[in-house]
Image (tube, rainbow, N blue to C red):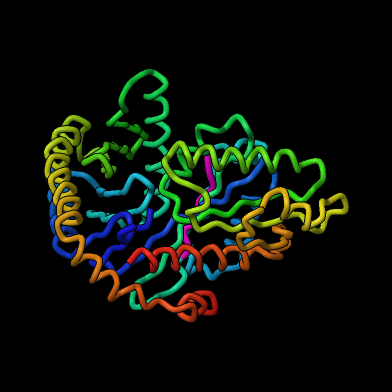
Amino acid sequence: MSFINYAAREINCKLVYYGPGLCGKTANLQFIYSKVAPTTRGKLISLATETERTLFFDFLPLELGTIRGFKTRFHLYTVPGQVFYDASRKLILKGADGLVFVADSQIERIEANIESLENLEANLTEQGQKLEAMPFTIQYNKRDLPNIVSVEELQTTLNPRTVPWFEACAIKGIGVFETLKAVAKLVLNDLKSRT
Amino acid sequence: MLGPDLILYEEEAQRLGAVLQKLCQDAKARAVFLIEKSGQLIDAAGETEGVDAMSLASLAAGNIAASGGLAQLLGERGFNVLFHEGERKHLHLSVVGQRGILVVLFDQRSTLGLVRLRVKRAAEELGRVFADIARRAEQEAARAREAFEAQFARITDEDIDNLFTS
């Protein structure tokens, strides 16, 4: 839910990183957190299990600068990827202004990617929203691993509408900021187009 | 679509701020926070220094959302009040005006009873302000659209790129 505060001169938007378990959603936020200046970011909150699997969500507020005199702040969230946390995913998805789908490029995870993407669409539909109408980018993560599906195949399977997509290796930071920048751009353009 | 989901103008911002200030004093609270249900901090009053308000907002919203999910499981419409009791600090969370969450942080200077009483009164006033915000959004849709357009329709790709270079 975008929130424009004329009194405080702020624009606040919510971005949600979605994807199957262990695809690298939290790794995206961790890399962003490690690279941006402490003055521009808040705390990285991770509600995780003892084995560091996301239990509820990760949260990172980022203040990117000013645009037309308004402080522009993005609130980055990840959802828990494991299938049985669907109720939590629905809660976090509410009010999202933009979405990143982090796909795991490994051959054995292709079905998990499809299942997660279908789950995203179903949860949006339940909230009266359509994925096609939302600012949306896809990140093909783990491109550094040996057993990966080709980008062409991933595109055919996961991205038939050809939304902006990026190859990434999130733990090394490759493609992380490119993805963030692309979705932020889509969100701000979407906000602009609502006039 | 017409503009963003929530626009807060000076007048309503001041009214919300005044209610929060009064609540903080009357409830003898350390601080109070008003949060939108999706986790955006709207305003705060009291001793907010040393409290990471943004993290508090996102966690409180997650907390209320999870409680709402639990309520649904039990066939309840919602759990509108949550209370977290610590050794020295306590949190009272309540849903106000359908879209807001009011968080009161208090310590031994106050009591749960007093906080509950004052929150009840403040919630009514906050509910009225939220209703006015919604009414204004409806009645002044055209004017709001103009103001919004004047401010944001001219955002260029360059403006957005600059956000990432600074």
**Residue B7 position in % (x across, y down):** 26, 59
Position of residue B67 in the picture relative to residue A134 (left or right): left
State the residue lying farthest toward the top: B74
- The relative height of residue B161 versus residue A157 in the rendered view (above or below) is below
Identity of the residue drawn at 32% across and 31% down: B82
Give the magenta part as a residue range: A56-62
**Residue A95 position in % (x across, y down):** 41, 48
Nearer to us in this view, A129 or B83: A129
In the picture, the quarter occupied by the N terminus of chain B is: bottom left
Nearer to us in this view, B133 or B13: B133
Q: Does the stretch in magenta take in A60?
A: yes
Q: Does the stretch in magenta take in A61?
A: yes
**Does residue B151 appear in the picture of this structure?**
yes
Q: Mostly what secondary structure, the magenta segment?
A: strand
Q: Quadrant of residue B15?
A: bottom left
Position of residue B6 in the picture relative to residue A99 (left or right): left
**Residue A191 position in % (x across, y down):** 39, 64
Nearer to us in this view, A142 or B82: A142
- The relative height of residue A182 versus residue A151 in the rendered view (above or below) is below
Identity of the residue drawn at 58% across and 54% down: A100
Q: Quadrant of residue A29?
A: bottom right
Identity of the residue drawn at 31% across and 28% down: B78
**Does residue B103 appear in the picture of this structure?**
no
Position of residue A166 in the picture relative to residue A47 (left or right): right
**Residue A13 position in % (x across, y down):** 42, 59
Identity of the residue drawn at 53% across and 53% down: A99
State the residue lying farthest toward the right: A146
